[in-house]
Amino acid sequence: MDIKIENILALLPSSEEDRAFTPSNTDIYIKGRDIAAIGDAPEGFTPAKIIDGHGKLLIPGLINCHTHSYMAFMRNVADDLSFDEWLFGRISKIEDNMTDEDAYWGAMLAIAEMIKSGTTCFNDMQMNIFMTTKAVKESGMRAVISRGLVGSGDDEAGLNRLEQAYRERDAFKDCDRLSFFLGPHAPYTCDEAYLKKIAAEAKREHMGIHMHLSESRNEIENCRNTYGCSPIELARRTGLFDSHFIAAHCVQIDEDDMDILKKYNVNVVTNPASNMKLGNGFAPVPEMMKKGINVCLGTDGAASNNSLNMIHEMSLAALIHKGTHLSPLSVSAEDTLKMATINGAKALMLDDITGSIEVGKRADLAILDLKQPSMQPVNNPVAALSYSANGSEVDTVIINGEPVMEGRKLLTIDEDLIYSENEKIRRRICQ
Ligand code: NI
């Protein structure tokens, strides 16, 4: 659809070295799926739709770089428990009873929540192939999907999961909003031989890798006991870092780990809410940024957060490191917005098409209502996003040039149906 967004305050990329965003009052022209022009209209442009941007803020759509969307129906089922009790005592048991259809409705609920808080792209690790992908395709979302891989050596189940990952990738190759990574789950659910196998497969298939790494102290201790090294070193020596790599968490890492991450251009997703909620600690985000590691932001699943709201996550990322480092300079509001947009796009190998408001990129955009008490007066819109907004200010969302929400009404998703289906799942397997 050809759309003109008129007279809007837009966070455009800055040409100045000392800042990343320039707030500018401008017009945006969307032709098909792309941003065709900023400022002056392209020749012969006749919009099918005009959005009045007066009193609104246009931001690049947010990118949630680590989540498990199917888990949305597990929101608030397992709280204030130890990690082992949470995962093995509660979550795994619900997952054992979960059907493919449950995963689909969970993913739909997650997508509704993400769109309503300004997210236009997410990086998912899932177990039920064809379910999250179907939800992404139907909802108009953009996503990178990894089939979670667990296994040991050359066992058949592990190899089957790899085959499933390829089958799903091939089945959705015509959807330009979907791309696929391989998803070895974690060093404690994949043994070294299986990790080596995945590393070789990723190289052969030219696929990126998405994995949980160095999340908890227990994981580090077990890895050192089993392999005599840290999870980061294990990933390096199995060859996983020879492919494009996105590591979720990296909470319990040391200087040597960080040097490896930098050397191999590993992208790190920090998930502050999940890490705090499960008692895993604080990722050394300021230290990683100082080393030049690409740090991006994620919510993790709704069972460990329990929110998929990236604006809430940005607030945490901008605040917690100031507290833990006793320094208000550790992570700025601007750093946080970069993590949630362009850094995420780089991590997902999508920075040529999304992550910033630039001509030629896809129109993946969120429009916030500035006429809300939380956003007034408009002194600094970048600071407002991290420190003042709560997500409910998001009014309109466009993905791949198509409006998916207007006036907070979802256009591609039947909200009531999603709520009733998730309620049925809750009653059946979450009680
Ligand atoms: Ni996770």
Image (tube, grey):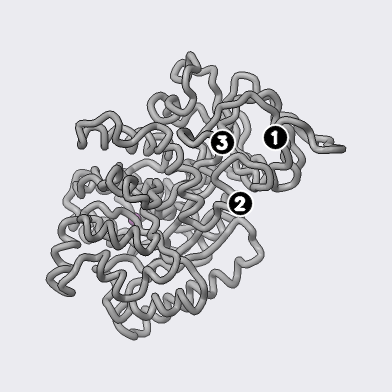
How far across and how far down the image is residue 65, in percent? Answer: 43, 51
Could you give the CA–CA distance between mark 1 and mark 2, rounded to whole angstroms? 16 Å
The furthest residue to the front? 17
**Does the beta carbon at disc 2 come under 8 Å from ligand 1?**
no
Q: Earlier in the sequence, mark 3 or mark 1?
A: 3
Q: Give whichever of discs 2 and 3 has the lower sequence position.
A: 3
Disc 2 versus disc 3: nearer the observer: 3
Seen in the picture, residue 36 relative to 246 is either above or below; the reply is: above
Give the Cα distance between marks 2 and 3.
19 Å
Q: Secondary structure at mark 1?
A: strand
**Snapshot quadrant of residue 189:** bottom left
Q: Amino acid at mark 1?
A: Ile
Q: Quadrant of residue 406?
A: top right
Which amino acid lies under the numbered mark 3 shown in the image of this protein? Ser
Q: Which residue is mark 1?
A: 38
Q: Secondary structure at mark 3?
A: loop
Q: In percent of the image, x 33 and y 79: which residue is there? A: 194
Residue at the image position 23 percent from the left and 45 percent from the top? 282
Q: Which residue is mark 2?
A: 353
134 over 73 or under it: above or below: below
Q: Is residue 327 left or right of residue 239?
A: left
Q: How far from the left and from the top, in percent, is residue 13?
A: 56, 37
Q: Which mark is residue 15?
A: 3
Work out whether mark 1 precedes mark 2 in sequence or the reverse, and give the earlier one.
1
81 vs 52, left or right, is left
Q: Secondary structure at mark 2?
A: loop
Instruction: Classify residue 384 as left or right of residue 236.
Output: right
